[in-house]
Amino acid sequence: MLSKGVRSTIKRAWQEFFGSSTIRMWPSLGAFKGYSRGALKADFGAGLNVALLGLPQGMAYAAVAGVDIVFGIMATAIAAVFGTFFSSARFTMLGPSNATAFMIYSFFVTYPGKLDQINSLIPLLSLMIGVVLILGAFLRAADLGQYISRSVIVGYLSGAAILIMVGQVKHVLGVQMVPEGGDAATDTPRSLFGMVWRLVEQVPNASWAAVSLGVGTIIVYLLLQQKWRRLPVFAITLVLGCLCASALATVDGLGFGPELARYEAFTPADLVPSSPFHFASGDVFQEMGALFGLALAVAFLASLEGGLMAKSMASRSGDRVDANQDLYGLGVANIACSLGGGMPSSASLTRSALNFESGARTALSAAFSGMLCLLGAVALSQMVAYIPKAVLAGLVIAVAVSLINRKNIRICLGATKSDATSLIVTFGATLVMPLHVAIFVGVTTSVMLYLRKAARPDLVEYGFTDDGNLAESSKRNIPAISIVHVEGDLFFGAADLFRSQIQRTLADENLKVIILRLRNARNLDATSVMALADLVREVNKRERHLVISGITKSIYAVLKNSGMIDVVGRDNIFLMSPENPNISTRNALMRAQELLGTAEADIQIYVDRNKERNEPS
């Protein structure tokens, strides 16, 4: 049987995490009331524009992930439709993304034996990602995204862009990464340097037809993108490349015939999974264990992409961002992709921006886009056999270039040393580690650098001048009472350093009473409470006294819930008064004098000089 205190703690935790949840099951239904014909026309037109971009992009990102292109097509259709009804943003377009697709590929290529199973494991991975995202939404994990340094995202996307481009060069060259007669599971290069070296070895075997198509596709795409941004440039370039290859295939000896690598056609029946739970097998729990780290990493990256996209769109449309609701919608979309035969999905900035620029009025534009993608896939299923891999690879490379934002890189490198370090470490990690590991290396580095700056207490001795004003002492007097002014976060990172500073103060044999002035202290946690308990024991052992003044109601609640009120002594704790913030310190001084049995005592005050020292001069 749980004790009353434990039950109370569990209840508070439950209310904190779930009691104030604002997740709505169907957030977009209210937006469709009074839906007009004009809105229908605008949404359908925007959906058509996005579908012309989304369908070929879905195929391209499936190729990046190393899965059958039907997974990308179904994800583009299903995620867009479900994002309509479960997300809060009007212009959000869900579906496969470049960064998440390559993270999936980098995981499977790293582990021998898994690459051949990628098509069978993708639905299970999508399901796991969806569950993680939904749990994160109810735990309000999206709110934590603001604490992730943008330097990490910039470094990750820059490194991933290079890996994506290098990974597609094999199709542009028309060569194989696995030697003839080799085993794909063991002979596939698993690092950037391994891929580059293998490509250099294969250059003599390159197909000039594939090279001309790939390079030509990149040039045409960049030219069209520069002059006609609002047109479906991706789809237009893909069609032009396919027409060019088909026309040249009629000329013998040029290399554009059957020897040119193309994608396999599929039938409409291939778009439908064999059963809703087609990923289930006897080894499903073993596979879940193997995929767990990847699922967390993809969910984490998808949540960051979604947050950045939502803020970008909100700044243009004036809409309010509900990041946790969008996280919930993304989770539902991934579960739907799992059951419907799609690959993991994220939020697409390019398709969302196109949706906004095309004049979409409501979230129904995303639903129209998804349905049009599905209809297009059914109608054009046999046409896939006419798409050369070199053309699609050229498009992927051209789009990957946009992931490298030189302006943001310059800002991160020039802002602070911490930003530059986070960027460089994350970028380097993406080049030498699997991406699902690299992103956490970057986040860990960023958090460590933040904690290093936040957890540096620096106490400076202050005293009273002859006229009663507070000033820094150039000459140390021997006080009987020491006032330690604590300012900033008293979280776990600062607890040990805070305790060591106070212990050095206790080394003064003439010191009898320490007053902790916590008026500007914040975020007291369990580690700091335990450090305070150690301090109380140390003070009592030396036959000294500890008094606390200026504590806020939130800090008092932490002390009360942890049982520290009785440890310190109720008579030795003084709450801050909003009407007179300094009265608690005066009362604490009176209590200190009472403990000393005197009405007068020498007093010195210590304050945190970190804030002053960190202010720009």
Image (cartoon, rainbow, N blue to C red):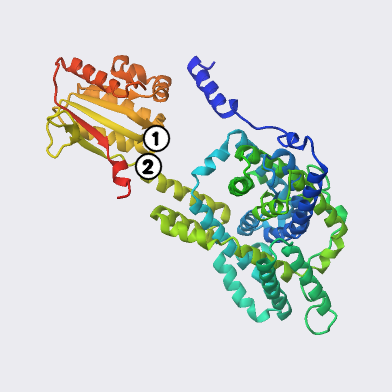
Q: Residue at x 78, y 34 (%)?
A: 33
Q: Is residue 370 visible?
A: no
Q: Quadrant of residue 513?
A: top left
Q: Specify which label sits upstream in the sequence, 2 or 1.
A: 2
For the residue labelled by badge 2, is the local secondary structure a helix, a strand or a loop? helix
Q: Which of the image's four quarters has the N terminus?
A: top right
What amino acid type should be assigned to the residue bearing mark 2? Ala
Q: Is residue 347 visible?
A: yes
For the residue labelled by badge 1, is the local secondary structure a helix, a strand or a loop? loop
Q: Quadrant of residue 495?
A: top left
The residue singled out by tag 1 in the image is: 491
In the rendered view, does 434 fall on the left or right side of 342?
left
**Residue 377 image point, x, y percent:** 83, 56
Q: Nearer the viewer, residue 390 or 193?
A: 390
Q: Nearer the viewer, residue 605 or 19?
A: 605
Mark 1 residue crowding within 10 angstroms, few (<14) / some (14–19) / many (20+)? many
For residue 227, the mark is none
What amino acid type should be assigned to the residue bearing mark 1? Phe
In the rendered view, does 599 fall on the left or right side of 155?
left
Q: Residue at x 56, y 29 (%)?
A: 17
Q: Residue at x 72, y 75 (%)?
A: 213
**Residue 104 image point, x, y percent:** 64, 54
For residue 515, above or below residue 276: above
The residue singled out by tag 2 in the image is: 454
